[in-house]
């Protein structure tokens, strides 16, 4: 029987305190993982295999006292394995796929650097709770956008032209024959560059309403040597999409849009006959009860990232603040309201954290 104090189940209190303490520990590990991302510590550890703290400090050229404490924290947290007999540390290859391999479909190492911006905005976020409004895109800084670029890039490179677009045979054929594609909310241009390489005969353009993103995308296109085959333009598609396209993509963008309905209306008008709008969204539900019991545990992530970035930047722009947890029902309704008569859901097992929708007018 549980011990109780004034009707309080103390075993339940202890279990919950343990959960909160685990969350507190994970929170404190965040800066250590962000430092690791900046200094390439996970990559170095993956390359070296089993290594002592002294050897690792010598190899990285970093202060041994900090390295020893960092390795110890990572070992206690379960990120790194520790061999007590040999006093060595090792990053298992399975963990390296998540923390070190920037080409892995499971790579999450750069997301710790993105979280720096969230803590920096606590004062502004509290003020938004009191008075409304939000935090604009311009407030998140270069580290956030660099981390986001490195986080999203692997999926585009591994799946966009190999799985996602081939699932739309008519679009795939059109682009191979020299058709046209536009990526709305293109950010730093990762999807556009992959499309240009995967469909060398196609015309590809990226639109974004954030000037620093367009500048970064142009720089990235030059570095990839495809600047003569792609174009980037600063544009709010609510004001219209110039030209017509066989494919228009929205990758984790629809829920971020301040005004998603008029944006989708513009996109519907810009599709050629038989053209498709491919939407990727978080694989979450539209209602709280289902997200609490989410089989992939994405509910808390969806709502928290919404407050920290997705919803707040939309509200800062005077938008509706859709939030990350749109869910299939809301996406279908919004598409139908915006002039799309066909909404086909596409699921890709190797991309479990996203769900895709092919929209056609």
Image (cartoon, rainbow, N blue to C red):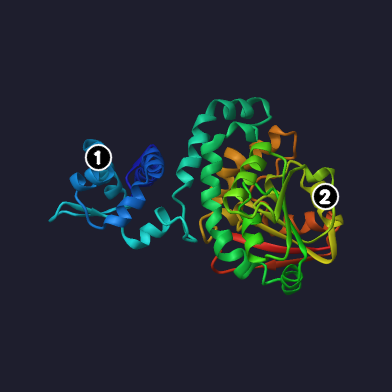
Circle 2 packing at 10 Å, graded few (<14), some (14-19), many (20+), is many
Circle 1 packing at 10 Å, graded few (<14), some (14-19), many (20+), is few
The residue beneath circle 1 is 69
The answer to whether 326 is drawn above or below residue 307 in the figure is: below
Secondary structure of the residue carrying tag 2 is loop
**Residue 34, located in which quarter of the rendered image?**
top left
Report the side of 221 relative to 91 (left or right): right
The residue beneath circle 2 is 241
Nearest to the observer: residue 236 or residue 289: 236
Q: CA distance from mark 1 to mark 2?
A: 53 Å
Q: Residue at x 61, y 25 (%)?
A: 127
Report the side of 158 relative to 259 (left or right): left
Give residue 213's position: percent from left, percent from top. Answer: 64, 41
Nearest to the observer: residue 99 or residue 340: 99
Give residue 156's position: percent from left, percent from top. Answer: 58, 59
**Residue 199, located in which quarter of the rendered image?**
bottom right
Whether residue 180 is visible, yes or no, is: yes
Nearest to the observer: residue 38 or residue 128: 38
Q: Residue at x 46, y 55 (%)?
A: 102
Give residue 207's position: percent from left, percent from top. Answer: 73, 47
Report the side of 94 relative to 286 (left or right): left
Nearest to the observer: residue 130 or residue 27: 27
Give residue 323's position: percent from left, percent from top. Answer: 66, 45
């Amino acid at each position: 029987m549980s011990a109780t104090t004034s009707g309080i189940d103390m075993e339940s209190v202890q279990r919950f305190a343990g959960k909160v303490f685990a969350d507190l520990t994970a929170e404190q590990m965040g800066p250590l993982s962000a430092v690791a991302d900046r200094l390439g510590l996970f990559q170095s550890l993956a390359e070296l295999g089993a290594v002592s703290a002294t050897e690792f400090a010598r190899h990285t050229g970093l202060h041994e006292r900090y390295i020893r404490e960092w390795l110890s924290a990572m070992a206690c947290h379960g990120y790194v394995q520790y061999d007590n007999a040999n006093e060595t540390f090792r990053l298992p290859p399975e963990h390296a796929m998540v923390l070190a391999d920037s080409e892995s479909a499971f790579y999450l190492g750069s997301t710790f650097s993105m979280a720096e911006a969230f803590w920096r905005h606590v004062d502004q976020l509290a003020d938004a709770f009191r008075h409304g409004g939000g935090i604009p895109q311009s407030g998140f800084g270069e580290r956030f956008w660099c981390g986001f670029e490195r986080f999203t890039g692997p999926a585009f490179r591994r799946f966009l032209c190999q799985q996602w677009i081939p699932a739309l045979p008519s679009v795939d054929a059109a682009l191979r024959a020299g058709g046209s594609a536009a990526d709305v909310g293109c950010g730093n241009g990762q999807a556009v560059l992959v499309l240009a390489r995967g469909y060398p005969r196609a015309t590809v353009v990226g639109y974004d309403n954030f000037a620093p993103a367009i500048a970064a995308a142009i720089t990235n296109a030059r570095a990839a040597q495809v600047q003569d085959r792609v174009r980037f333009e600063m544009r709010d598609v609510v004001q219209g999409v110039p030209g017509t396209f066989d494919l228009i993509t929205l990758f984790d963008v629809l829920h971020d849009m301040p005004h998603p309905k008029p944006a989708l209306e513009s996109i519907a008008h810009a599709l050629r006959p038989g053209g498709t709008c491919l939407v990727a969204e978080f694989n979450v539900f539209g209602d709280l009860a289902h997200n609490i019991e989410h089989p992939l545990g994405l509910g808390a992530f969806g709502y928290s990232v919404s407050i920290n970035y997705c919803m707040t930047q939309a509200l800062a722009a005077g938008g509706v603040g859709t939030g990350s947890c749109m869910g299939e029902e809301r996406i279908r309704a919004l598409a139908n309201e915006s002039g799309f008569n066909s909404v086909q859901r596409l699921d890709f097992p190797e991309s479990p954290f996203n769900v895709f929708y092919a929209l056609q007018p």
